[in-house]
Amino acid sequence: MEELLREILNEIGSLKNQVTSMNDRITSMEGRINSIETEVKATRQDIKELDGRVVELDNGMVRLEDKFVRLEDRIVKEHELTRFKQEIEYVYNELENVRDDLKFEINNLTKKIIQTDNDLIKFKRSFRNVK
């Protein structure tokens, strides 16, 4: 019976050691769980900060898109102004050509008038001489 009690006591001691070992493992696992939870919290915080940066980047992209649209509008307007200036230059050149043509015609008409006046004067002289 003593031997049976010793075996039972040894078995209880062994079970106690196993329980202590299990408690140590549980404590170690709880430490790991706490460490993982801390990392999860830090990761969530990092995600929130990154989300904030993404929102800032999105807002920046919207501002850049607005500036790009304004730049495109400005380029279109500058192109239209350039085309308009070219049209004005063309019309101005055409007007200069018309002016030059008119000057030429006026000069020719003036010459004809002078010639006609001279012819008239000659006719008058010859008519007076005939009288």
Image: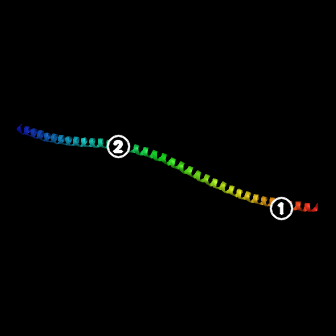
The reply to whether discs 2 and 1 touch (Cβ–Cβ < 8 Å) is no
| Amino acid type for the residue under numbered disc 2 | Glu
N-terminal of the pair, mark 2 or mark 1, is 2
Q: Which mark is residue 118?
A: 1
| Amino acid type for the residue under numbered disc 1 | Asn
Image quarter hosting the N terminus: top left
Choose between 129 and 45: the one closer to the eye: 129
Q: Report the number of numbered marks.
A: 2
Binning the other alpha carbons within 10 Å of mark 2 as few (below 14), some (14 to 19) or many (20 upward) gives few
Query: Residue furthest toward the left?
Result: 2
Does 101 appear above or below 11? below
Q: CA distance from mark 2 to mark 1?
A: 101 Å
Q: Position of residue 94 (x, y in %)?
A: 68, 56
Binning the other alpha carbons within 10 Å of mark 1 as few (below 14), some (14 to 19) or many (20 upward) gives few
The residue that label 2 is drawn on is: 49
Q: Name the image quarter holding residue 90.
A: bottom right
> Which residue corresponds to the image point at 43% horizontal and 43% vertical from the top-left?
59
